[in-house]
Image (cartoon, rainbow, N blue to C red):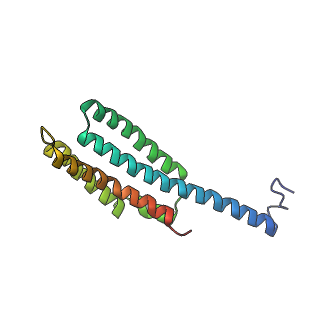
Amino acid sequence: MNEGGALEGKFTPEEALQQIGAVDRRVRRSVETAGLVYLLAGTVTTVYWTTILLGPRWLQISAAILASVLVGTFARYHEKLGVRDRAIVRASRTGGAVHLAYGAMTVATLIAAFFLRPGDPGGGWTALAVTLAVATGLPLLYAGGRILRAPR
């Protein structure tokens, strides 16, 4: 007998079902984690852009540093999960709808931040800034929701 209780690499039906269940639980947990990472990244993106567009300079710098660390951490963790579930692959595909929408909204928000921000921002600017911040985070929030709701 080997350590798994199977004879010469062969499993009993009960052992095989236990192994399948264990693998299924690990994959589901990894997929759920990836979905939560996307939701967290979408939320961080929204808070980040709201801070960049509306906050004082010291808070903008702090948000940029924190967001850089978080994005790096999210990307590394997502890659480390190593799960290639269909919904994750669709959400994270370079050139896919999520990346294109996120990229387009990021560019639009950057343009607003650098070229459209008035010297004395008022209510109209605040509304535009919040709308842009939320719209920039939406593709990631959408991807996270799709991953978590995808049938397995």
Count the marks: 0
Specify the quadrant of the image occupied by residue 29.
bottom right
Extreme-right residue of the structure: 1
Residue 100, x across and y down, in percent: 30, 59
User: In this view of the protein, which residue sits in the foreground, 52 or 107?
Assistant: 52
User: In this view of the protein, which residue sits in the foreground, 131 or 142?
Assistant: 131
Q: Residue at x 29, y 40 (%)?
A: 51
Q: Is 138 situated left or right of 77 in this image? A: left
Q: Residue at x 35, y 58 (%)?
A: 139
Q: Residue at x 31, y 53 (%)?
A: 134
Q: Is 125 situated left or right of 96 in this image? A: left
Work out whether residue 108 can be spotted: yes
Quarter of the image that includes the C terminus: bottom right
Work out whether residue 93 can be spotted: no
Look at the picture and state if 100 lies above or below 69.
below
Residue 59, x across and y down, in percent: 30, 33
Q: Is 14 situated left or right of 91 in this image? A: right
